[in-house]
Image (spheres, rainbow, N blue to C red):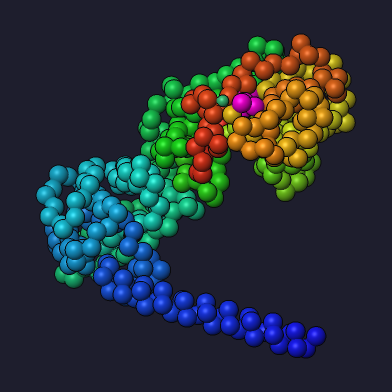
Amino acid sequence: MQAWLCHELKLQFTIVELVTRLFQCVHVFEHFKCTCVLTLDKGEDKKKQASMNDSIILDLATDASETTKDYLITTLRDKLNGHKRQKIIALCAREMELTLPQSIETIISTDNIDLCFKAKSLMDADNITDFVLVTSLMMKKYWETVFLHMFSHVHNWSIRGVDVPNQPSGLVRPEVDSVESSIKNYFKTVGNPDEVKILRSALIPSDKFNAGFHERYGGVSQLPPIASLNTIYTMRKPDSQLAINENRRRLGQAAGFDPEQLKVARVEHGKSIWVVGKTPPAYYDGIVTNMPGITIAAPGADCSMILLADTVTGACGAVHAGWRGTTLGAVRACLKAMVDEYQTNPKDVVAAIGPTVDGKCFDLPAVDASPVHELDPSFTWPSESNIDWVHADLVKANVKMLELDGVPSSNIDTSNAYCTVCNKQFFSHRRDGIPFGNQIGFISYKA
Ligand SMILES: [Zn+2]
């Protein structure tokens, strides 16, 4: 045992040593690179310096004094030292001529938020998430506040506040407290909210329920795969919470619900259901309620969004079901929650299934799809790409489960179950990769 342990420790030591050596090699390389890249502040983050792909935003707008502009431009020109950056963007309050050893994209606006949003749009277009803002020390705090509200967790940004010598006195930093509301108001002016399109089910009675799904247009999200009406915030998307809030506000406006009263499932590809009014589980793929005015919703981007409406009691449910949720019976769990909580009779339930990846555009290991196959062998068929894989029709599987649990076939509407991969007006994880946007299916009881 001891010998084995010694051997194991020795092996571990050797691996540690190897990794350390490798790290040293990398470090030397990084150090070599560091000497070539922009270093404006003392004590700045070494990791940021090490990246040759950092893009640079040069603030020549907020402190419009010639002293500051000249100093920033000179400093940047010296420090670039012939080394290309992925992108250099200059923020300007007015037209100006810039001569730097790399092509610069210039944005002109007298609105700082507009400048920041347009810089973000330029970077989103090239999927750039790593960048540094070069500004005067006085403006650092202001831009930090703007960036915190404009960018998200996927962005790796830093701000170099340059201590400009002989800066003119009397310069005033813009208000930091009003930044959040300025961005909120700015977002209202982005894009065209009239493009927001709602898909309704003719089967869900509109006098009792406000229910539907949405297409992807009319929002403020800029990165192509998530543009533009992405209604879900996650750590992997370059949308700030304020951008998502604006998208939800537009959706609420188009659909006629209060976005402040919107409850969206926190999905984990399981079958937990949250009964509104009770303590929510950490994650839940479905929500049920009978409270008027509360809009419940489930997200999708290939996965099914299924809405359930009890036309007698007014109870309703929204559930997310991808292949995992479908094989676990998430829709059955959602219907059962309505039966248990609100004495719903499944015969009174109307169901609508939203945009979902079609079986033809989706395959998975046959072993994972076996619950779908067991519902009806015709719901799965062999995949051309892999002998152990099958295509699976998630829509038919969910319809079948609802029927088995007592919902009449004539009450189940699949007319909005467009294939998300084939129809570009919807977000699709399979088609767009990561990051991808999300649509939601929503329902509320009008009472
Ligand atoms: Zn398709």
Query: For the point 47% across and 80% down, which residue is it?
Result: 21
The x, y position of residue 2, in whole percent, is 78, 88
Judge from the rendering whether residue 179 lies leftward or rightward of residue 261; answer left or right. left
Q: Quadrant of ligand 1?
A: top right
Query: For the point 82% across and 20% down, which residue is it?
Result: 403
Judge from the rendering whether residue 87 lies leftward or rightward of residue 4; answer left or right. left
Taking depth in this image into account, of 89 and 379 the one nearest to the observer is 379
Judge from the rendering whether residue 346 lies leftward or rightward of residue 258; answer left or right. right
Q: Indicate the quadrant containing the C terminus: top left, top right, bottom left or bottom right.
A: top right
Q: Is residue 111 above or below residue 446?
A: below
Q: How many marks?
A: 0
Query: For the point 82% across and 30% down, which residue is it?
Result: 374
Q: Which residues are magenta?
A: 354-360
Q: Indicate the quadrant containing the N terminus: top left, top right, bottom left or bottom right.
A: bottom right
Q: Is residue 150 visible?
A: yes
The x, y position of residue 408, in whole percent, is 81, 14
Q: Is residue 152 above or below residue 42?
A: above
Q: Is residue 313 visible?
A: no
The x, y position of residue 229, in whole percent, is 49, 32
Taking depth in this image into account, of 48 and 160 the one nearest to the observer is 48
Name, please, the residue furthest toward the front: 387
Q: Is residue 304 above or below residue 152?
A: above
Query: For the point 19% across and 51% down, which residue is it?
Result: 103
**Quadrant in the picture for residue 165:** bottom left
Judge from the rendering whether residue 168 lies leftward or rightward of residue 132; answer left or right. left
Q: Is residue 158 magenta?
A: no
The x, y position of residue 144, in whole percent, is 39, 57
Taking depth in this image into account, of 275 and 383 the one nearest to the observer is 383
**Quadrant in the picture for residue 376:** top right
Chief SS of the magenta region = loop
